[in-house]
Structures are given as structure tokens and as C-alpha cells.
Image (cartoon, rainbow, N blue to C red):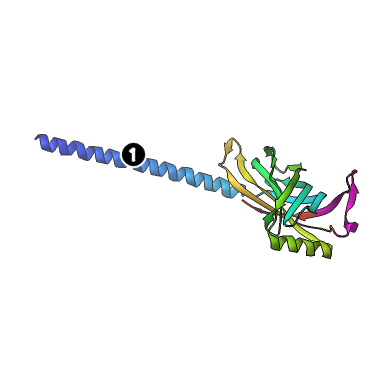
């Protein structure tokens, strides 16, 4: 008799466990479907970035295979979403030449961007005697002789989406802004300040990956 009661209790526990498990699965499924429906209705769109201008204070080969640079870049970002805000976390910008980083990273202060809002950032990025690969150093001399140098302004960081009171987890943000600057002949630039700095209007749309 005791064995039958024991088996009966075990069977009841199994059935109770199955009910609880099924309830949890159904609840999670409903939550997931709700989030997907909200996401589909709101249709979140990644932010857009435009490189407005590049001011060159220094772009000099100090000694063979070393480069000293000093830029100020102006970037605008726009949140195209009507119902979703964007938190920008831990953003940093830097410049590369021929896929090699030639400046140190400069941090951009964290910010929140509301619906359809714009932000403008004008950070300085520089590098003092940064080692450059020998083939890139040779290529730089050739580019300067031709009158055009191609650089890429990059922004890396993390973003979060805000829908009402809900804030998502962090997503990696990668921004790439190509720019041609004519260091050889400065006809396309405008002298600014007293340090022979040259400002180049770029107005180049950047590629954005999230």
C-alpha cells in the first residue's frame, strides 16, 4: 500500500512539474512574440552619420615609417526613428590610412538622441610619431605627390534602443566615413587659425553597421 502511495505522489509531482514547465514556456513564447510584434510595428532603423568636414593641423612624416597627425573632424548623427530613442555609449573616433590606424582613439561623451533628433560632434584626433608599415609610408609619399590622400574616419562604440520605458541591451556600432583630402595642393581647403591648418568640406555619408 505504501509503495502505491509513493508512486502516486511521484506521478503527481511529475504532472505538476510538467504544468509549471509548460506555463513557463507559454509565458516566454508570449513575451517573445510581443517583443517581435512591437519591433516589427516600430521598424527600428539604425542611425545615420555624415562626415561634414576635416580640419588638418598636421599630417607629417617625422622620420622614416613614423607619422605625426592632428585632425579635427565634424560628424553629424541623426536618429531617423519616430518612436525609438538611441543611447550612445562608449563611443570613440580615430583615423585610418590604408586600413592602418594612424591616430589614437578619442572618446565621445555618452549621449541620448531622441526621436528624429540630430547631434553634432567635433572631436580632435591625433597621433604623435605613430609607426606606419613601410609599404604604407611609401604609399603616403606617392599619394602626397599626386595631390590626394584617402583617409577613413571611424567611430566605434555601443548603442541602446529606448521604446517607452523599455531599454534594450547594448549593440555594437561601427561607423566608417571615407574622405579625400588634398594635402599636396591646398586649393580645395580653407586656411583656418594661425597654425596653417586647412579645413576641407567633405559632406560624406558614412556606412553604419549595428
Is 46 left, or right, of 69 in this rendering? left
Query: What residue appears at the point 57 percent right and 50 percent down from the top-left corner?
Result: 40
Is 55 left, or right, of 3 in this rendering? right
**Residue 24 highlighted magenta (yes or no):** no
* Coordinates of residue 108 in the picture (x, y in percent): 70, 40
**Residue 201 highlighted magenta (yes or no):** yes
Query: What residue appears at the point 73 percent right and 49 percent down from the top-left corner?
Result: 129
Q: Residues within 10 Å of mark 1 (few under 14, many from 20)?
A: few
Nearest the viewer among 189 and 98 is 98
Is 189 left, or right, of 24 in this rendering? right
Q: Is residue 126 above or below residue 151?
A: above
- Which stretch did the figure color magenta? 184-202
Is residue 159 among what the camera can see? yes
Quadrant housing residue 7: top left
* Coordinates of residue 94 in the picture (x, y in percent): 70, 48
Query: What residue appears at the point 74 percent right and 63 percent down from the top-left corner?
Result: 138
* Coordinates of residue 59 in the picture (x, y in percent): 80, 52
Report the residue marked by disc 1. Answer: 20
User: Dividing the image into 4 quarters, which one contains the N terminus?
Assistant: top left
Nearest the viewer among 117 and 19 is 117
Amino acid at each position: 500500500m505504501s509503495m502505491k502511495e509513493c508512486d502516486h505522489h511521484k506521478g503527481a509531482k511529475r504532472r505538476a512539474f510538467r504544468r509549471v514547465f509548460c506555463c513557463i514556456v507559454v509565458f516566454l513564447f508570449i513575451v517573445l512574440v510581443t517583443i517581435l510584434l512591437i519591433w516589427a510595428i516600430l521598424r527600428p532603423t539604425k542611425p545615420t552619420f555624415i562626415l561634414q568636414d576635416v580640419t588638418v593641423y598636421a599630417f607629417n612624416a617625422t622620420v622614416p615609417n613614423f607619422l605625426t597627425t592632428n585632425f579635427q573632424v565634424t560628424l553629424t548623427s541623426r536618429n531617423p526613428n519616430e518612436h525609438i530613442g538611441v543611447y550612445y555609449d562608449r563611443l570613440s573616433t580615430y583615423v585610418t590610412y590604408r586600413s592602418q590606424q594612424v591616430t589614437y582613439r578619442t572618446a565621445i561623451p555618452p549621449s541620448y538622441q531622441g526621436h528624429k533628433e540630430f547631434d553634432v560632434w567635433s572631436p580632435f584626433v591625433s597621433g604623435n610619431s605613430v609607426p606606419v608599415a613601410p609599404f604604407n609610408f611609401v604609399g603616403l609619399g606617392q599619394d602626397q605627390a599626386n595631390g590626394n590622400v584617402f583617409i577613413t574616419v571611424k567611430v566605434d562604440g555601443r548603442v541602446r534602443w529606448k521604446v517607452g520605458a523599455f531599454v534594450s541591451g547594448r549593440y555594437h556600432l561601427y561607423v566608417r566615413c571615407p574622405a579625400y583630402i588634398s594635402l599636396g595642393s591646398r586649393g580645395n581647403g580653407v586656411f583656418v587659425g594661425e597654425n596653417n591648418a586647412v579645413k576641407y568640406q567633405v559632406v560624406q555619408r558614412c556606412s553604419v553597421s549595428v
